Image: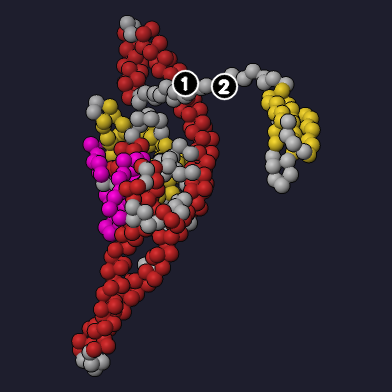
Amino acid sequence: MITLNLAGKRFGPKLLFENVSWLITPQERAGLVGGNGTGKSTLLKILGGMDTLDYGTIQFTKGMTIGYLPQDGLSLRGRSVFAECMSVFDNVKAMEQEMEALTVSMSELDPSSPEYNAVTERFHRLENEFTSRDGYNIESQVGMVLDGLGFAKDDWRRPTEEFSGGWQMRIALGKLLLEKPSLLLLDEPTNHLDIEARDWLEHYLQTYPYAFVMISHDRYFLDVTVKKIVEIWNKGMHFYSGNYEKYLQQKTERREQLEAAYRNQKERVDALEAFINRFRAQATKAKQVQSRIKELEKIERIEIPPEEKTIHFSFPQPKASGRVVAECKGIAKVNGASGSCWWVITGRGSRRSSSCFRGRSR
């Protein structure tokens, strides 16, 4: 669907990535990862047509559709939540209205006339497309998505502008899921979701019929939804088959191989330089020295990027609480008859002792 060829992008003087090639297939399920500032969101915008490359080319398959969800910043207003989501199906509703008008025309025309044949032919074409797009169930589709994203039915008729930014992002996500584009581009889609909505989205993406590429810091979410990890690292793009857990294993193996190749290359470079420095002044070794100089110039040096910075923190062990956490005396509850009880609660939260009696509270 999308082909990146020798692609590169700068952000001011900073080179984000270069010489990147990637074929995104119709069944792509990829997680885009990398350190902060490596260009993940920028690449997602390039794939969505909202940004351009500085180097290389990008090609899109004719007729494909793309849906893009940013991290935040969307603002919806002027319609109810339900109407906003139903707007995705405006063209389907237009087909339904035309079919109704054609039905009226067929009832008024002579079945033997050429006009009648043209109207029926148009009606059948529309009906086939309407059915293929599940036009008879669009309202139930909207209800299913809104329910999955945590909207109570009482909220469906509320204006979108009454909702906070996080809930507006849920509406925008719902619209994208209802559109079912050929390629979904999701930038941190779980940021504004609670656990229930995140679990629902997880199951939805597992059965999504088309391709998607997403950025997420939720490792478990990536583990259960994607089949490929694409990492932007060291100004390049690296592909790992499998989910996030397999990516971590493969990345460790790849770095170990790179470090081993670096050590081997360094040993060879050191040996060449030592030979050149030792015999440079000897005429009898001139041919051998020149040969090693040429070999040294042809070596493409392997670089080991610095380790990614990580944040480490710990919480100190709190002081132990007292043996008695809370003590209640003279508590009364009247429910037809009065009574009084007292409790002593220990540090473990269990009731140490109690005493209850009927009668007037003291």
The kind of residue tagged 1 is Arg
Between circles 1 and 2, the one closer to the viewer is: 2
In magenta segment, residue 180: no
Please tell me whether residue 301 is drawn above or below residue 172 in the rendered image. Answer: above
Picture residue at 27% right of the left edge, 57% below the top: 62
Q: Is residue 297 above or below residue 357?
A: above
Task: Give the mark nearer the N terminus: 1 vs 2.
Answer: 1
Percent position of residue 134, x then y: 39, 68
Quadrant occupied by the C terminus: top right
Q: Quadrant of residue 177?
A: bottom left
Residue at image x 45%, y 18%?
267
Q: Which residue is mark 2?
A: 315
Most foreground residue, 162 or 25: 162
Q: Which mark is residue 263?
A: 1
| Picture coordinates of residue 194, whole percent (x, y) | 49, 44
| Dots 1, 2 in contact, CB < 8 A | no
Q: Residues within 10 Å of mark 1 (few under 14, many from 20)?
A: few
